[in-house]
Image (tube, rainbow, N blue to C red):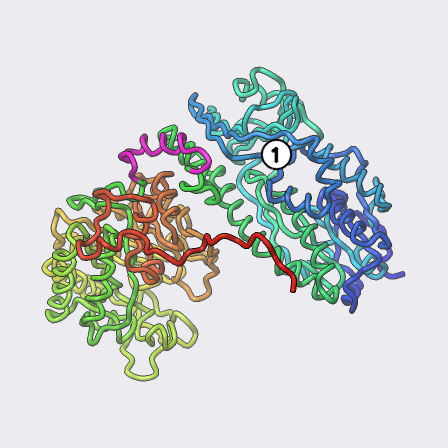
Amino acid sequence: MEGAVIVPTSGARGTARQATTHPQPPTTTNHPLRVAIVGGGPGGLYAAALLKRLDPSREVTVWERNAPNDTFGFGVVLSDETLGGIEHADPVVYEALQKHFIRWDDIDIVHRGTRHTSGGHGFAALGRKRLLEVLHERCRTLGIDLRFRAEAPYPAWLAETYDLVIAADGVHSTTREAYAHVFRPHVATHHCRYIWLAADFAFDAFRFEIAETEHGVMQLHGYPYAPDASTVIIEMREEVWQAAGFEDLDDQESVERCAKIFAEALGGRPLRSNKSAWTTFRTVVNERWSHGNVVLLGDAAHTAHFSIGSGTKLAVEDALALAACLEEQPTLERALEAYEEERRPVVASTQRAARASLEWFENVARYLDQPPRQFAFNLLTRSRRVTHDNLRLRDAHFTESVERAFGCPPGTPPMFTPFRLRGLTLRNRVVVSPMDMYSALDGVPGDFHLVHLGARALGGAALVMTEMVCVSAEGRITPGCTGLYTGKQAESWKRITEFVHAQAPGTAIGVQLGHSGRKGSTKLMWDGMDEPLEDGNWPLVAASPMPYKPQSQTPRELTRAQLTDIREQFTAAAWRAARAGFDLLELHCAHGYLLSGFLSPLTNHRTDAYGGTLAKRLRFPLEVFDAVRGVWPEERPMTVRISATDWAEGGTSGEEAVAIARAFAAHGADAIDVSTGQVVAEERPEFGRSYQTPYADRIRHETGIPVIAVGAISSWDDVNSLILAGRTDLCALARPHLYDPHWTLHAAAEQGYDGPGVVWPAPYRAGSRRPQTGRTDAPKPRLTLGT
């Protein structure tokens, strides 16, 4: 039979080739009777047990290329949520696992000889070998055919022979690779080497320890999984691993070297290996999880870094969801669709958290100079799943100690501590981010802008920013954009600043100056964002003659004389802004507008003194900055907004973003407002909660320059977490302030804070407590009487 070739499928050995036959189309029944499972790890075994338990008549076969007692790694951590799902689906497995769990609550962070302990976290772990033994026994009891030391048949043969094929064959899945043209996997490797080891004693907490060696930073992740055993993972960046000579050591020498480096954490005890090898973590993402009657599960479908303890957890949860969907849906096709629909958002969220955690550990050297308590808090909140408020519930004493060390007065959340920029003291850390309103007439801000900005100034934020205010009529994005190129515009802005200063004393108002460049002469956002005007267009200019979109107008490349004219336009606008009473000025060098277009290699193809190397691409934006700083009052701060990545290949790199920030700071910028993207239309952003914050974090820690973080920061808990961890100095929020102009006041009320960091306007003080709602605690009926 075609495709009936026996090849490796459940491990790293063997070379995958594209399947020569197609899987069966999904059957019209939801009840596959013959099930093949490739891979005998926890996910595959648990899927087998669930499917057999749901229907004892099913024929379920599991192929595992290793022996029953072979296992790699040592301990497995499972969450209470996962255990609850196991208990509900299969109490027999749950009861068997319960007998072997080690439970603990504490996390220890050891950094530069100081140990900080945070409690209340709730972990449960057991040996991976023990977990497999429980699942083996359950599968045998149910009558599942377990085939150890057996390579699974070729995927196409399995797909033809069985009703359902579950590929649980791990990160190196040959099943996935056989149908790579359909699953379309993306596998990313990362910057650290790590090795799984074990110690013959039990840590009394989940332990993170940092070792600063002559070769660089190394780290230990350790946790107990038995009364007398712990998992120990040693991790370091590739360049540190090479510099330390691990590449030249054999397995035993590596183990002994690791034990020596972390002798204090281990109490002088040795480490042991189980066919362990140094490896690099691979993040697996698939565009599809099923093809015909073949479906991916666990690491074959997705991986998430071990630092959030998710691999086995995700695989077990996949098995639960797949089994449930097969029972609930009318056809196999719909069941596999429902499985992916249910699991994909959960996995995506976990992978985002895991990526944040992975990158934190990759760059741990960046944080070594933080105060010890702040370092510990930063580590605990690295994935953004543990937050300030969440940690306060788990361990109030630890969180309060971090707040005291940070300088929070008693009862003051981090977001309500003051921050100084040059001669301006902001009473809290909240900024109303610039938001284009497209509601001006001839560049003049009107009543709408007075109400819009005035309402947000009354809402408690320390700093309220205007939208991008354009320095010329030709520098507008749309006909509805505001400007500062006429005296009438300046007078209208003065009306607004005077309102803010009189009615919201203590609130600062800032202006963002910019020029649209190649992204100008477009429709209002709600009529077609970035779409060219149908009539009434004005000519565009840019660093290079490149349209933003294929249908966009092609700009003219600026000549040296035109560069001088535009620099003077910025200077004149800044002079007007100062006279209008703005407290802060931000130069817009982001989002693909004119100055951003000079900075990015994707939009600056010039061959003169203003293009080529980063130093040359910086030349004109720095000339503009210097000219503006020259007329802007000395005591008032200036910030610069940059796009720290273009989200496109060949665009601004992380190293360049740091260099750009340093250059502006050297010329007198007081803070860098760190945004990303919108430089090229073909960008591919990686959206998620506070997704741009890592770029601000990097710039802050590598340069020491104050930063403003922006981008999907949506809760006061996020603001507190980011500020207290030292990832940013200020947080700029846009959409939350459209949803709630009084966002900051309400954040204070919800946290029970009433202090100098936020002030309710006198007419609003009666609303500083939540309004009462209808009663929801009425007594429930004691008896139900029949009719």
Q: Which is nearer the eye, 347 or 599?
A: 347
Q: Which residue is mark 1?
A: 124
The rendered magenta stretch, by its main secondary structure, is classed as helix
Q: Quadrant of residue 735?
A: bottom left
Q: Residue at x 26, y 63 (%)?
A: 467
Numbered disc 1: secondary structure: strand
x then y, percent, for residue 394: 46, 36
Residue at the spot x=20%, y=76% of the render? 442
Q: Which residue sits furthest top?
A: 268
Q: Give coordinates of residue 498: x percent, y percent.
A: 12, 60
Is residue 515 depicted above or below 655 in this figure?
below
In the image, 35: left or right of 752? right
Amino acid carrying label 1: it is Ala
User: Does the magenta run of residues contain 414?
Assistant: no
Which residue is more in the foreground, 240 or 122?
Answer: 122
Where residue 434 sits, quadrant-wise, is: bottom left
Looking at this rendering, what residue extends furthest in the bottom direction?
535
Which residue extends farthest right? 1
- Residue 674 position within the rendered picture, expressed as x and y whole percent measured from the top left: 34, 51
Q: Is residue 724 left or right of residue 667?
A: right
Classify residue 266 by image quadrant.
Answer: top right
Q: Check disc 1: other Cα within 10 Å, few if <14, some if 14-19, many if 20+.
A: some
Q: Residue at x 81, y 43 (%)?
A: 139
283 up-or-down from 537: above or below: above
Write down the region rendered in magenta.
393-412
